[in-house]
Image (cartoon, coloured by chain):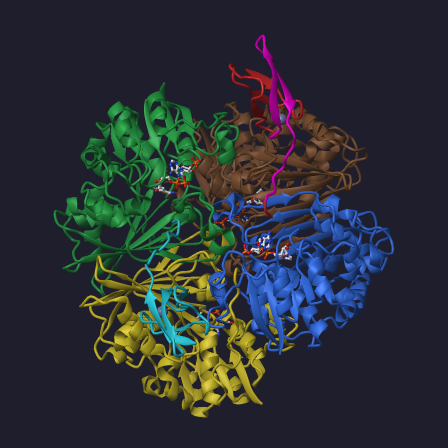
Chain colours: A cyan, B red, C yellow, D blue, E green, F brown
Amino acid sequence: MKTECSMCGGLIEVPDDCLKGELVSCPDCGTDYEVVGVGGGQVTLQAAEDVKEDWGE
Amino acid sequence: MKTECSMCGGLIEVPDDCLKGELVSCPDCGTDYEVVGVGGGQVTLQAAEDVKEDWGE
Amino acid sequence: MVSVGVVGASGYVGGEILRLLLQHGGVDVTLATSRTMKGEYVFKAHPNLKGFTELKFTDDDPVTAASKVDLLFLSVPHGSSVKVTPEIVEMGTRLIDMTGDFRLKDPSLYPIWYGFEHPAPDLLPRFVYGLPETHREEIRNARFVANPGCIASSTIYSLLPFARSGMINDVTVVDAKTGSSASGNAANRASVYSERYNSIRPYRAAGHRHTAEIEQELSQHAGRKVKVALSAHAVNMVRGIQTTSSVFTDREVAEVDVWKIMRQTYRGEPFVRFIRDRDGVYRLPDPKITVGSNFVDIGFEIDRHTGRVVVISTIDNLIKGAAGNSVHSMNLMLGFPETQGLSTIPLHPA
Amino acid sequence: MVSVGVVGASGYVGGEILRLLLQHGGVDVTLATSRTMKGEYVFKAHPNLKGFTELKFTDDDPVTAASKVDLLFLSVPHGSSVKVTPEIVEMGTRLIDMTGDFRLKDPSLYPIWYGFEHPAPDLLPRFVYGLPETHREEIRNARFVANPGCIASSTIYSLLPFARSGMINDVTVVDAKTGSSASGNAANRASVYSERYNSIRPYRAAGHRHTAEIEQELSQHAGRKVKVALSAHAVNMVRGIQTTSSVFTDREVAEVDVWKIMRQTYRGEPFVRFIRDRDGVYRLPDPKITVGSNFVDIGFEIDRHTGRVVVISTIDNLIKGAAGNSVHSMNLMLGFPETQGLSTIPLHPA
Amino acid sequence: MVSVGVVGASGYVGGEILRLLLQHGGVDVTLATSRTMKGEYVFKAHPNLKGFTELKFTDDDPVTAASKVDLLFLSVPHGSSVKVTPEIVEMGTRLIDMTGDFRLKDPSLYPIWYGFEHPAPDLLPRFVYGLPETHREEIRNARFVANPGCIASSTIYSLLPFARSGMINDVTVVDAKTGSSASGNAANRASVYSERYNSIRPYRAAGHRHTAEIEQELSQHAGRKVKVALSAHAVNMVRGIQTTSSVFTDREVAEVDVWKIMRQTYRGEPFVRFIRDRDGVYRLPDPKITVGSNFVDIGFEIDRHTGRVVVISTIDNLIKGAAGNSVHSMNLMLGFPETQGLSTIPLHPA
Amino acid sequence: MVSVGVVGASGYVGGEILRLLLQHGGVDVTLATSRTMKGEYVFKAHPNLKGFTELKFTDDDPVTAASKVDLLFLSVPHGSSVKVTPEIVEMGTRLIDMTGDFRLKDPSLYPIWYGFEHPAPDLLPRFVYGLPETHREEIRNARFVANPGCIASSTIYSLLPFARSGMINDVTVVDAKTGSSASGNAANRASVYSERYNSIRPYRAAGHRHTAEIEQELSQHAGRKVKVALSAHAVNMVRGIQTTSSVFTDREVAEVDVWKIMRQTYRGEPFVRFIRDRDGVYRLPDPKITVGSNFVDIGFEIDRHTGRVVVISTIDNLIKGAAGNSVHSMNLMLGFPETQGLSTIPLHPA
Ligand SMILES: NC(=O)c1ccc[n+]([C@@H]2O[C@H](COP(=O)([O-])OP(=O)(O)OC[C@H]3O[C@@H](n4cnc5c(N)ncnc54)[C@H](OP(=O)(O)O)[C@@H]3O)[C@@H](O)[C@H]2O)c1
Ligand SMILES: NC(=O)c1ccc[n+]([C@@H]2O[C@H](COP(=O)([O-])OP(=O)(O)OC[C@H]3O[C@@H](n4cnc5c(N)ncnc54)[C@H](OP(=O)(O)O)[C@@H]3O)[C@@H](O)[C@H]2O)c1
Ligand SMILES: NC(=O)c1ccc[n+]([C@@H]2O[C@H](COP(=O)([O-])OP(=O)(O)OC[C@H]3O[C@@H](n4cnc5c(N)ncnc54)[C@H](OP(=O)(O)O)[C@@H]3O)[C@@H](O)[C@H]2O)c1
Ligand SMILES: NC(=O)c1ccc[n+]([C@@H]2O[C@H](COP(=O)([O-])OP(=O)(O)OC[C@H]3O[C@@H](n4cnc5c(N)ncnc54)[C@H](OP(=O)(O)O)[C@@H]3O)[C@@H](O)[C@H]2O)c1
Ligand SMILES: [Zn+2]
Ligand SMILES: [Zn+2]
């Protein structure tokens, strides 16, 4: 099932059998989301905390 | 104190206060030695086992 | 099958057009000219083509060449197209001109940016600026296309969403980094490997010609005069262009705002990729992962400290910046599927 | 459509197999495993694939992976295939193993060249050495293929005509130069850019593992024991291998003789090119014009002064030296046209 | 002879300090620490030093190290200096700190740019910002020096004449291109050769830490708040930094004006060269001809179209951007001739 | 002070001689000639020298040049020295000839290896082959020195211990890899950056001229005819040469035996380093850590499988392979300490 990224408008693929608490990320902008609601062929996502790792430069 | 490498003839620097069991290596050929005897301003070395690590290629 | 020819086919762009056409499937390459390599196999200049064609260079002049094919790519240096193009236009052969000679609409810009008075200003309106994403329908109906400059197209792709949305103002600073193939195959002191390896040569700190076409195109979309301060550097690689643009915005913009205008501008475009990630090795566009393909990769970062959006884009100068874009135009002009012959995945690592 | 999977898909060879399969048209890539990147898009490891797939890595173990597909590519380090392969063989899933674990027929060679006693010597005969040019029919009928090593295949292609014709004798000296991707994606002190740039690292002056498979394959064709003195260097580039071999011949050979055995050996082969010219920039094989393709380019020079033929060949280590060759084998195994998905023209210049 | 030590001596900057000191003639290097290479010859980490020293690494902690020498170079990562420096300051050993931990005067900037609350804000005033051209007399009298960041120093050298003369206004846009050694010797996915070769990585499009020290130093000279919009890219080479700065000026400036402020600022400076030529291969600064030396090369171009001066400067990040500058400071602190050990001619071509 | 001049000073070797002499301290460079850059500052050709000299090129012909100095370096292409040297020899000015025109003792070798009949065979005995390690005393007393070829000197350094000890037999296979500067500054299709980057060009698979001088020098030491099978490749870098030699020995040799002959041959030599380690990144010679210095780095590996010793050596072709060696000779000829001006530590990483 696909849902729209609230940051960039990209399509995020979420497995049909996903569970609350699973993590997904947007292929376009890299925003991480947590699945906070499932049901009725719909899924609700909440942006996870943004921990940007250092590139090492 | 300096002693000669039995492999390559290079000079190996061994600290004056070295102890038996200490490891030293030859700056020219990389052979590792264990200090097996000390005394009288002299030191006896024995080549340590050659464990060549992989370069990762 | 449609027959196409390439004039200036011994050059780097010419060679790349040949490579794409030989894999295209819809056209027949029947002519490749070179003044210096007449009679040689084209793979003498382009050794990669060995095994794919036994075509030989002829020294047909451009006008003769145009008389022998259905569509002609003219891939010669700036200033040498305009000498022959009027006659070709008259003849009516479909023409895609890789030079800058017909890119500018305002003839008065030629003396300023190119250093010559344009000898055929009346022909300028008959050429379409060959950027498919902004001139798709015109190209479909065009007989004469002026293919964009390589730094120009990378810059325009970056700034277009900002121009369209009215976000752009003041002067936008653009820092361009190009590989060596962007300056063609000429052998001279400056192109010698020993001099260019390990170098970052600021070969045009100011006054780069592409400024003119960038401003022309962006101003159209912005509905006001857009100004660009472009500095171009040649870096230690052969292919690829990266442009880093500082767009100063009046009001503070959020990431979501930028995404919105990016999507609006490029929805459905087959050759635009967005590259932006929070971690990993490739967080923003890098020619390393674009080269070899017809993509323009675009990404951005917001700089609150100075009120700008840093927009970064990369292309393969010989493909999206030249041959690929022109084959895209050819596809539009001749009614082929837009992406035919252009969907190769880039290599990684390479 | 046939479903295929890749184990070790986060690696460089795994990524290249994915790239080729995504453009192949005849197969469905349904599985890509990584122990460390589970749940990530494959384009996180292989950013070039962005826009071509939304597949994500799973962490299926190799045996489970084998149970889910029609054909499996196993692209993990040497020594880790042999631990899981017996179970896969039992299951019967078609398998192309990229490691050296099943390349040698003589189990006694494993301790000498690989440093381990082979745990499943009885399986060795069930694997075909996956060099299509020499084992085409066997591969067609194979379920289990051991794909050749990259330096090995470049060397074998060079020396095969000499082995077959009985010209080879004594020891043949082979100098190999490889790009960095030949050693995979591991991050360690030796693979750091600052250490490896501008370097020529003689990383295996003697004792290179591929010696064993080179001698095995050539000896078969020569009908006598062939010996190879191989020294391998890592040079300043990412892709490509060049091997320069000194073949000492008993009797004086003429250019025409060498051409004859070359033609005899490679007539009709779709992925072998001969590169030999008297002038121009590319007179002998150079990875620069091979990389990006599935070609092996072969050329030679006769050295009367010392009675040798210098044979030079180049391949893209990730394509003809790995992923391309394995897809070629897959085509044979599954009945696709041999060249399907493998006919890309290399880039020049790049 | 004065005895000096280096903490973090296995790193790239540490190694470069060792190289310079071993050729200096006035000091004795008696101590080089590494936590991971204790007991190894320093040439194991720095193979270039083979034949020049038989010194071995110790794992003395920084405070112990400070107790054993007359002057200590602290060449460890950001954030790890501040943990040990207070104790060293108390001890009174002369210290040159290569990190950013004591470069900023305003402690409130640390959380913003470095992500940590400064634990010893009272010590900040006791450190001199170690840029000899602007703080020469202070350094002469200093016991504690905070050596500038590499991109920071290149940028400051470029913009200083404009800051001093009051020409600078608004935001100055700075595009930085660095070699790989600027990010140290750490092995990780991003530093692997195969990933970094042929790449232009916009590793800090906005928010680069050096922004803070650049603004601090320039504002002092300008007598007003100077703002800098810095974007940093890692390019395909090991050593060298180039910064291209767009200085927007209120009034139109002529070439002669720029020369004047350049001369005023840098008259008599032994390590500043002006690079500006109308023809030839090297018309503006290029790391290619700076690397290996302690020079900062500066040049400029005037862009009337947008009312800016493009100022370009290059340094060797490990020398003028780190080790060389710190040895320059050491010379001042210890009363050696300023240029001792620092006058090597760069190589060309290389 | 002694005055010295350089003919062909616009070239890469000429520029490197200038660089070394400007830092030498014992001589005055009073003359630098170029036919094409008369009146220009030498730093126009050699931008690294900016700040170190205000010398300008003259177009004095070589003979006039010789009349104005105490010692002349002749750094022009092969074949153009012999046209002017007889006159200079007559004049008696000390001369160091960088070309191959006076390296061979046997005039009959010139047509074979250089393609010309030697016009002054009687002068050949008056030149000393300028390899200080083997001809030290002769050079001290020489007026005329023929400086060795770059690949030749790297190869001779590798093989000398084997020749002297009688270990060498049959044909020794030598694989050479060189940077681009080894072929001078000429701009032509093959030297263009876009063509040479990322390339491994087997530019002389057989028949390399240096073979003749290698065999001449080694045969002298071996007391028998030594034969060398040399293949030369140009790789992707500017400076540095690596030669990998396969020395086949009659009887099995042990590591300790090789060390013994290495020590015997090079005891006390200031510019020879042995590079051989069991772990770490640099286990054998690599140009990366030699370039910029006057060292020859030598290492080896024993290959029991084929009964050979693989000997590897690296030099900086412009220093130990040319300018450095010639300054070493100058030091000997003029009574300076041998190492004066030549003891720079190479850079790492770079
Ligand atoms: N390189 C890029 O990335 C790029 C990108 C976009 C646009 N372009 C534009 O594309 C055109 C071709 O560029 P390129 O990079 O292929 O250049 P190139 O490698 O120098 O090739 C140009 C070819 O044109 C021929 N030529 C040279 N001077 C000529 C003249 N006065 N009249 C007719 N033919 C002449 C030459 O072939 P013979 O001497 O054998 O006849 C030469 O091989 C240029 O206008 C360039 O600005 C280039
Ligand atoms: N590179 C070449 O040119 C080339 C050519 C011919 C053949 N080969 C062979 O192809 C195979 C793959 O090479 P590569 O270059 O792709 O190497 P690579 O880049 O290092 O990738 C190997 C992958 O295997 C996984 N892996 C590592 N250790 C493993 C273990 N112990 N068990 C299971 N999986 C493991 C890793 O993924 P995770 O950690 O994410 O699971 C890694 O990404 C090797 O056998 C190599 O010898 C390589
Ligand atoms: N590279 C440049 O161009 C440049 C320029 C200007 C300033 N700098 C600054 O100079 C300093 C050193 O940079 P570099 O490039 O030399 O880095 P580097 O190559 O990473 O070396 C740093 C060394 O410090 C040691 N180290 C690492 N973490 C440590 C810790 N937590 N505590 C104590 N020691 C630690 C490591 O040695 P062991 O693990 O062996 O102890 C390492 O070799 C940094 O602050 C950097 O920002 C660098
Ligand atoms: N490059 C190396 O690594 C290396 C190593 C060992 C020995 N060598 C030898 O050193 C010599 C110089 O090599 P290089 O690399 O410096 O070559 P280069 O860069 O081509 O320089 C040679 C210079 O000689 C001048 N020249 C060219 N043709 C000439 C002629 N016919 N008569 C007189 N002058 C001429 C040119 O200067 P103008 O045109 O300005 O007069 C040119 O700059 C060669 O004999 C070479 O074989 C080179
Ligand atoms: Zn998104
Ligand atoms: Zn030893």
Camera-side residue: D247 or F336? Answer: D247
Camera-side residue: F192 or D321? Answer: D321
The residue under the point 66% across, 36% down is F300
Ligand 2 is found in the corner quadrant, namely: bottom right
The percent coordinates of residue C51 (x first, y second) are 66, 72
Q: Which residues are magenta?
A: B30-55
The percent coordinates of residue F343 (x first, y second) are 48, 30
The residue under the point 67% across, 74% down is D339
Q: How many marks?
A: 0
Camera-side residue: F175 or C26? Answer: C26
The residue under the point 53% across, 44% down is D190
Residue C42 position by quadrant: bottom right
Q: Quadrant of the N terminus of chain D?
A: bottom right
- Which residue, as the protein is rendered here, is positioned at the far top? B40
E30 is within the stretch colored magenta: no
The percent coordinates of residue F344 (x first, y second) are 47, 32
